[in-house]
Image (cartoon, rainbow, N blue to C red):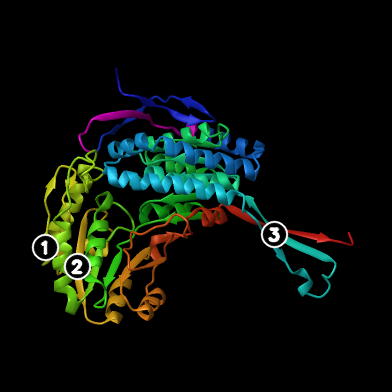
Amino acid sequence: MGEPIYALYINGEWMATQETFPVYHKYNGQLLARVARAEQEHVRQAVTAARRNFEQSELTPFQRSQILQKAAEIATERRDELELSLAREVGKTRKDAAGELDRVINTLRLSAEEATRIAGEMVPLHATPGAENRIGFAIRVPRGVIAAITPFNYPLLLSTHKVAPAIAAGNTVVLKPASTTPLASYQLVEILEQAGLPKGHVNIVTGAGSEVGDWLLADERIAMYTFTGSGEVGKQIKQRSGLRPVTLELGNNSPNIVHRDADLQQAAAIIAQRSFHNAGQACIAVQRILVQEEVSEDFTEAYLGCVRQLRVGDPEDPATDIGPMISEKEAVRAEAWVREALAEGARLLYGGKREGALLYPTVLADTRPEMKVNGLEVFAPVVTIQSYQTIEQAFAIANDSAYGLQAGIFTRDLDLAMRAARKLEYGGVIVNDVSTYRNDVMPYGGVKNSGLGKEGPRYAIEEMTDLRMVVLNLNG
């Protein structure tokens, strides 16, 4: 019996293509499936189907809410199957996969709740002379067809963060998943349709981003683009989208500040636990640890003690803490960055070992801002530790970055925490936890080269709707 073949999914029908590409088990290299490679005509058909279904849809907000709530229930029932699929397709440990499923279910549930809360606002037209007989209010209306382009690292969750709010708002979707991890998107659409979503409200086109993404950008019928991925691609989307709105969730090289008044043991344990989840392949993963000089030695010793306890290996083993990176190519790239930093004077405190796609947790000291492991987004289980003298210096080091997604700070001083909230140039400042913390209800998005717009169901729905002004002339 051969491996399964996934065709394109357009207007509720499977559409085979001449070419396919393979999807592999990220740990053992086994072929999991072959997936259709879309051509430009397929993308056009997917947008046509999405537009037609948007225009013809009669789903009420309550019905959309019920569908999303049912989808959350189905995902809960299927979570063991979905977790195992993520472990195989992405290389996630069972621990990380379980965390992703928790958040998928929450995002579906939160989107269901927000579907019934979409509202506008009254506008006090009577505040200006001559408008006393007019009543004004604004309503929120869906934009239309949303193109959702998702990355490999959280394929089920990040597809849900785009698709569920889009459906809640009354839009339809053309979903383009990452070629290395497309199977999760098929599972999501299957769950939504099982929950009652009419066919054609979400369509899947697969293939290389350089091709499929370009074809999506060229189609003027798409009302909005929502993308998570690299800054380079994000800039291309913004440049080519014209006046159409975009939400861009891009990179980061997250700083995490440990001040002298922090609980060092607690900070070390939390940071070590969250430094390497998903093999460091998260845009808010801990990358730069900034420690106040007088406690640097004590913190580093405690931190390395926690890191040494982490287990690397088969992601399907429940005891594993760190699985493989998405590919050996990416592991080799990260290893090269580490070696380059060492050659330029950095000091290896722990790790540095690679076995195929497995890169063992690596901790560096004496790094400089111009080193790739510091200045760029490493997107691997690699962390740097740097000391600072004053908190102002820590803020300056943290802000000396092209990125601005999220930052963490550990301190017992409430005044200092509030200063950090004002001074750190990031979309999110997490106090007494790591930059990696994300609750799916909160507005999530960065500044500078980390992107535009916000995710989180309520905030994504605002991005995915237009505010339409209505004026009633009572003398008309």
Looking at the image, tell me whether mark 2 or mark 1 is earlier in sequence order.
1
Magenta highlight range: 27-44
Callout 3: SS:
strand
Q: Could you tell me residue 209's position as x and y percent?
A: 38, 42
User: Label 1 vs label 3: CA separation?
Assistant: 58 Å
Left or right, 469 with respect to 143, comes to: right
Task: Please give the residue where the numbered disc 2 appears in the rendered image.
Answer: 385
Q: Quadrant of residue 92?
A: top left
Contact (Cβ within 8 Å) of mark 2 with mark 1: yes
Three-letter amino acid code of the residue under disc 1: Leu
Task: Please give the residue where the numbered disc 1 appears in the rendered image.
Answer: 349
Left or right, 415 with respect to 288, comes to: right
Q: Could you tell me residue 470's position as x and y percent?
A: 74, 58
Task: Please give the residue where the numbered disc 3 appears in the rendered image.
Answer: 138
Looking at the image, tell me whether mark 1 or mark 3 is earlier in sequence order.
3
Callout 2: SS:
strand
Contact (Cβ within 8 Å) of mark 3 with mark 2: no
Q: Could you tell me residue 403's position as x and y percent?
A: 35, 64
Three-letter amino acid code of the residue under disc 2: Ile
